[in-house]
Each structure stands twice: as C-alpha cells, then as structure tokens.
Amino acid sequence: MNRQAQAVVLLLLGGAVVRASVTDLYLRYVKEGLRPFLIAAGLVLIAAAVMTLWYDLRPAPRGDAHGADDGPGPGGHPEDDDGHGHGHHGPRVGWLLLLPVLGLLLVAPPALGSYAVGQAGTALAGQQQSDYPPLPPGDPAPVTVLDYASRALFERGASIGDRRVRLTGFIAPGPDGQPILARMVLSCCAADGRPVKLGMTGDVPLGLPPDTWVEVTGRYSDRVGRDPVNDAEIPYLAVESWREVPAPRNQYG
C-alpha cells in the first residue's frame, strides 16, 4: 500500500471510531467512561490521515533536484519506481486492513450474552467485602445484579434484610438446566468481560429463550449453588414477580 492508501485506511478507521463513540455503539466494546478517550483517539487518527494526504498530494517545489535526478515514480515518489518504469507496490494483502474497519462501520456486534456466561466462571470468585452501604430507598430497592450478588454472598444478606429488591439482567441456562439471571461486567473492554450469575427460586421466569432481558423483584435467599466452570459460589434470589423488558442501553454493568 502506498502512502495515500495508508492515509485512506487511517481516515476510515478514525471515522469509524468517532462514529461508534458519538453513538451508543461503543458500549458494545468498552466501558462507558472510556468515551472521551475513544473520541480523542479517533480525532487523532483523522488528523494524521488528513496531514498524510496533504503532504503526499501537495505540488512538488520547483527545481526539486531530488525529483529531477532520481526520476519520480507514480505518485511523485522515486522510491515507487524500480528503474525500468515499473512501480514497486506493497503486498496487496495490506488491503485486508480495511476489513475490520468496514466491519466496525457496517456491522453492530451484539453484546456478550448467555454463550459467554456458559464459558466463563462467575466474576465474584475470590472477591471479599464485608461493609456495604444501606440499600437505595424505595420498595423494591433498585440494585444491580453485581451489588445483590456481592451482598448475598459475602455478608449473607445482612445489609438486605427482609427488604424487596429489583434487578435487571438476562436469562442464561443454569448448571441444573434451570434459568439463571446474569449480567456481564467489564474491567476495561469486552475482551475481559466476566459474568455475574444469580440463581433464582420462587416465581422463576421459565420458558424464555436465552438472552431475554427481564426485570425481577424478590427477596434475599440463603440458598447457594456452585458454578461448574470455576466451582465458585452462586447466590440465589427468591423471586416474587418478574416481567420481560427491552435490552438496556448499556448491557454491561
């Protein structure tokens, strides 16, 4: 690939990053707080592409001895000519660099879901915390799957008591064939995504396909299961009611 083609690839890549960053598409790849860094990186790529094109396409200065002596090849670059009137070109395989760029522009990949849950152990393994703040106000109290699972597992529901809680997650197949409630959490990006798994008793949402998003309301359960992937403990929730909901804007959390 010559310098102009490289600049076009940079321009497309930078545009794809900026486009993903100003929409919610970037949430499929990284944590929400990384948006400013993605926008900055995309703008730097675009600026680099524009400067490369400007440098490569600007008219050559008059009396350029280098160009007169060496005989510029196609595009005005001596190095592009082999002395016999044939330009040297990089391997055409370089154009495959466009494929991930086009994929980012044209294809919106789904967020990690039930398949990833079945392949990775619960993210709560090895975590320890014993001092949790009071639950948010309201009945039921809105909490995340991670927050409930941590309170249920590491302090045996002491900060939950007999209060009702409301959680949102997606359905995934459990180790015993029963559905579990899950949510993927990220440290940085989708590549390090780990699931938080929550068993359910009581009014369990049965008959729903995997990756269906539901909002469940229930109370603390002292039942604990085991994750077959990493043998970590999986806490349970005593479900009192549930309803199907659309997938949230940010499916990680």
Image (cartoon, rainbow, N blue to C red):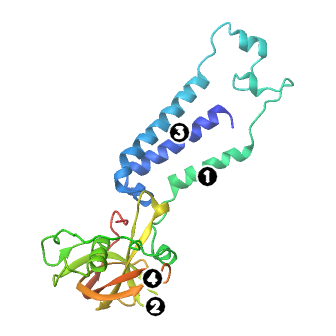
**Percent from the top left, x then y, of residue 41?**
45, 41
In this view, the mark in front (4 or 3):
4
The residue that disc 1 covers is 99
From this view, report whether residue 53 is shown above or below residue 244. Answer: above
State the separation of the CA atoms marked 1 and 3.
14 Å
Residue at figure coordinates x 16%, y 82% from the top left: 163
In this view, the mark in front (2 or 1):
2
The residue that disc 2 covers is 177
State the separation of the CA atoms marked 1 and 4.
38 Å
Q: Which mark is residue 227?
A: 4
- Mark with earlier residue (1, 3): 3
- Mark with earlier residue (4, 2): 2
Question: Amino acid under label 1?
Answer: Leu
From this view, report whether residue 252 is shown above or below residue 139. Answer: above
Looking at the rendered structure, the secondary structure element under dot 1 is helix
CB atoms of marks 4 and 3 within 8 Å: no
Determine which quarter of the picture holds residue 195: bottom left
Question: Amino acid under label 3?
Answer: Leu
For the N terminus, the image quarter is: top right
Question: Amino acid under label 2?
Answer: Gly
